[in-house]
Every structure is written in C-alpha cells, then in structure tokens.
Amino acid sequence: MIKTVGVIGAGTMGSGIAQVFAQSGFTVKLHDAASSAIERARVGIDKSLAKFVEKGKLSAADRDAALARLLPATTLHALSDVDYVVEAVAEQIDIKRDIFHRLDTLTRPDVILTSNTSSISITALGAATKRPDRVLGMHFMNPVPLMALVELIRGQATADASMQTAVELCQTLGKTPVEAADYPGFISNRILMPMINEAIFAVMEGVGTPEAIDTVMKLGMNHPMGPLALADLIGLDVCLAIMQVLQDGLGDPKYRPCPLLRRMVDAGHLGRKSKRGFYSY
C-alpha cells in the first residue's frame, strides 16, 4: 500500500507534484540537491494552498494537514523507506539515469520508480535499474495543482501491474490518466512542441508579431493561451531541450529547433523565469 511518496526535484513541477500528493493524504518526502530549493518550494506550496482556501476549495484545517504531511529530505538516502517515487529533475538523461540507478539500490525492490520527464525515454531510464518492469513515466502538466491530465508512459519493459498502480494513483489525486507509448515527446509534446516551434519560425520570418500570432490562436482556434505565451510559461530552454529530443529521436528535419529559439536561449531570455522571453514580465 502506498502511503509515503518520494518526490525528487523541488522546482516548479516537483513542488506542484508534492503539493497534490500531500493534499490527497500522502506523506511526501521532497528532495532536492539544493536545500534552499526545498524551502522555496515549501513557501510556494503554502501560497498555492492559501489560494485554494481563499476560493473556498479547501478548508484551513485541510491546508494545515497537507503542509504537515510535507517533509524535507536533504539527502537522497532519506527516500529509502518510501513506497513510490516521482523524479522531477532537469531534462537531462544522464542526471536522470544516475538518480534511477541510485534509487534502485536505495529503495525496496517492490517500489515503483517514475519520471515526470516530458520527452526522455522511459526505457532508457528503466535500463539504469534492475527493475525496468517497475519504471514508468508520470508526466504531470503545469501548473500541477490545476491541470487534470497525467500522461502515463509505458517503457519497453514496464509491467501491466505497474501501469495499473499509476492509473489508480492518478485517480486518487483527482487526475485523468492517459497512456502513451515510449516515443520521443510521447503524445503531448510530440504535438505541442512542433506547434510552438512553428510559431517561433513565424516570428522569425516576420509573418506576425508574438501578440498577433497568439491572438490568432486564441480567438481563431479557441486556445486558452497563445503558443508563444505558453512557451514563455514552460521556459524556452525546456522547449529547446524537447525539440532536440524530438529531432535526435525521430531523425526528421521537421523537428529542427527554430534558430530564433536557440538564440533566445543563448541570450538567457527564457520566458517568465528570467522575466523576458517573447514578452516581458
């Protein structure tokens, strides 16, 4: 039975994942290589829960209980007794494979190890362990507390039982699970990122301003947010990393990252996190 969940990475996604598990009654051990990130995540989660209380979606007592279930884990070894793991570190396969290898030696053999990766091969992460049947992708959407979808990715060796456990866990969190095969970008980013990339080409080629392009997609295609504002929200560095995974994994020139995207990332214009991207914040 899953009672304690380990979350690795206390950034935007990791803190959101930790919040939804804590809100749903699980004890959460949140680990990050930088202890300051854990404290920042706790402050952010506190603010997020306060908004739910203000809107009447959560009682003050439930907020306090959720915060009490959130435990800092300053070392990876502190996760040795957890019942389930979600990894949410940077989108770099070497870092992720190292974490999965270490988790494999730390945690009980029955523990399922999952990654919140948005594009990296689950099969490759599973191969870094002796339990590839218990490794799968659990790709949450940003912002995690508000978005209903969780993309579940089945690696080459992922067992049916592991997938079923993840499905039931998503339902407990109030999320809708959708299964995707282990191909670059899975379903969500295989479709979303080329659209964002094409919007950036349209800016580069002077087809329209960012405002014009986003307005067309919002009013003409009924998207709640334009692709360039969404790219700023996701982070242009993340968009570039995913496009590179698509290009490398699928080998098709149609996935070539836009040169303007590369240039903006080189300049440190990463979107909301750097206060400047296609828009200023």
Image (cartoon, rainbow, N blue to C red):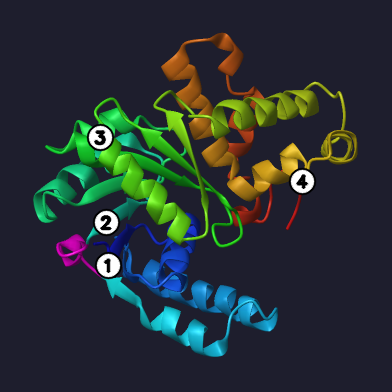
Crowdedness of circle 4 by 10 Å Cα count: few (<14), some, many (20+)? some
Counting residues from the N terminus, which is met first, the one under dot 3 or under dot 4?
Answer: 3
Crowdedness of circle 1 by 10 Å Cα count: few (<14), some, many (20+)? many
User: Marks 2 and 3, how far apart in space?
Assistant: 15 Å
Counting residues from the N terminus, which is met first, the one under dot 1 or under dot 4?
Answer: 1
Q: Quadrant of residue 59?
A: bottom right
At horizontal 85% and vertical 24% (from top left) the residue drawn is: 206
Residue nearest the viewer, comparing 16 with 175: 175
Determine contact: label 4, label 2, CB under 8 Å.
Answer: no
User: Marks 1 and 2, how far apart in space?
Assistant: 7 Å
Looking at the rendering, in which quadrant would you find the N terminus?
bottom left
Q: Could you tell me how many numbered marks the image carries?
A: 4
Residue 145: % across, % down: 56, 62
Q: Which mark is residue 159?
A: 3
Residue type, mark 3 in image: Ala
Counting residues from the N terminus, which is met first, the one under dot 3 or under dot 1?
Answer: 1
Find the residue positioned furthest to the top: 252
Residue on which disc 1 sits:
4
Residue on which disc 4 sits:
225
Q: Which mark is residue 84?
A: 2
Mark 1: secondary structure:
strand
